[in-house]
Structures are given as C-alpha cells and as structure tokens.
Image (cartoon, rainbow, N blue to C red):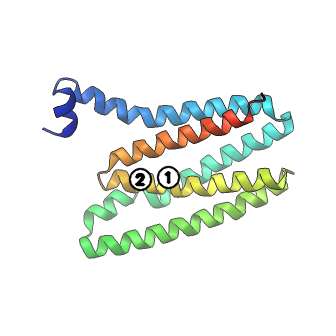
C-alpha cells in the first residue's frame, strides 16, 4: 500500500493518480491558452503574429530536443549500470544545456528578424531556452520514477504563465 492509497483508500487511489497525471498537462495548456488570449488583446496584430510564429517555432524546437534527448532517456538509463548511468546523465544534461544556449541565440536572432523590441526578443529567447531545460528535466524526473516532479513542473509552469498574463491586464 503506497502513500496515496493510505490517505484516500484503495478505491479512490487510481482516480487521484490519474487526476495528478492530467493536472499538469491540462493546467499548462489552459494557462498557455489564457496567455495567448491576453496577448491577442494586449499587443498589436503584427506583434501577436510574431509571437504566434515564435510559439510554434519554440514548440518545434522542444519537439526536436525531446526526440533527441528525452525519448531515448528511459532506455539508456534502464540498460546502464550505476556508473554508466551517471556518465550518461552528465553527458545528456551538458548537451541539453548547450541546446538551451543554442535555442536562446537562435530565438534572439528570430526575434530580431521579426522586428520585436529588445525586451520582447530577450524574454522570448529566455522562455524558449528554459523550455528546453524544463522539458528535459521533466523527462528525467519521469524516467527516474519521480512523477510528482513532472506534475510539479507543469503546475509551476502554468502558474508562472498565469502570473505573466495577470501582469499584462491593464488596471
């Protein structure tokens, strides 16, 4: 009997587990949707189009990084002994950090090319770089059996997006 089963009972434990499993992704998607609606009203149409393009490009970059670093992670960790596992993780964390730095500079270039302000460009580039790091850390937490960290990452991400959206609402 695990902790959840002790707290809510055997009958309700699966519902709570599935609830936590969907809480993160649904919360993140909902927060991103709300932020997008807020951007639609807060910025000029051309700027909204630029941010939309950057969001799609960021999702593509995260998908590529996920395929390269996150997808093989569970298999690599499962097949390795303790020493190899440490070396694999050191390597993947370093490569992921290099990928995040590359994403930052690429999104700086894209933001500049789209004629965004320096502040908008730097903020979005930082967002794109942090997404690379967050997504790999999320995959690592899941692959090492710490699913609560995955959910926590999604919930914190969603809350940060909601706070950013709240800052954009005119008083």
Across and down, in percent, residue 102 comes to 64, 66
Q: Secondary structure at mark 1?
A: helix
Residue at position x 85%, y 51% in the image: 117
Across and down, in percent, residue 50 comes to 79, 43
Residue at position x 39%, y 59% in the image: 72
Circles 2 and 1: CB atoms closer than 8 Å: yes
- Identify whether 22 is placed above or below 112: above
Of residues 8 and 86, the one nearer the viewer is 8
Q: CA distance from mark 2 to mark 1?
A: 6 Å
Q: Which mark is residue 112?
A: none
To which residue does mark 2 refer? 139
Seen in the image, is 67 located left or right of residue 107?
left
Seen in the image, is 108 located left or right of residue 23?
right
Q: Secondary structure at mark 2?
A: helix
Q: Hey, which residue is sitting farthest top in the picture?
A: 11
- Identify whether 5 is placed above or below 132: above
Q: Residues within 10 Å of mark 1 (few under 14, many from 20)?
A: many
Across and down, in percent, residue 46 comes to 86, 38
Across and down, in percent, residue 160 comes to 58, 42
Seen in the image, is 89 located left or right of residue 29?
left
Q: Hey, which residue is sitting farthest left in the picture?
A: 1
Q: Locate the N terminus by quadrant.
A: top left
To which residue does mark 1 refer? 135
Residue at position x 62%, y 31% in the image: 33
Q: Residues within 10 Å of mark 2 (few under 14, many from 20)?
A: many
> Total label count?
2
Q: Locate the C terminus by quadrant.
A: top right
């Amino acid at each position: 009997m695990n902790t959840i089963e002790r707290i809510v009972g055997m009958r309700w434990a699966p519902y709570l587990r599935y609830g936590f499993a969907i809480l993160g992704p649904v919360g993140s998607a909902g927060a991103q949707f709300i932020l997008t609606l807020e951007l639609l009203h807060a910025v000029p149409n051309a700027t909204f189009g630029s941010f939309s393009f950057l969001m799609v490009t960021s999702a593509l970059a995260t998908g590529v990084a996920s395929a390269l670093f996150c997808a093989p992670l569970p298999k690599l960790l499962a097949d390795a002994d303790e020493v190899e596992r440490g070396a694999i993780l050191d390597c993947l964390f370093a490569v992921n950090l290099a990928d995040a730095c590359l994403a930052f500079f690429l999104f700086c270039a894209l933001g500049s090319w789209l004629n965004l302000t320096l502040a908008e460009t730097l903020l979005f580039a930082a967002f794109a770089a942090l997404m690379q790091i967050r997504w790999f850390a999320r995959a690592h937490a899941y692959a090492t059996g710490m699913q609560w960290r995955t959910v926590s990452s999604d919930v914190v991400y969603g809350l940060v997006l909601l706070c950013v959206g709240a800052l954009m609402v005119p008083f």
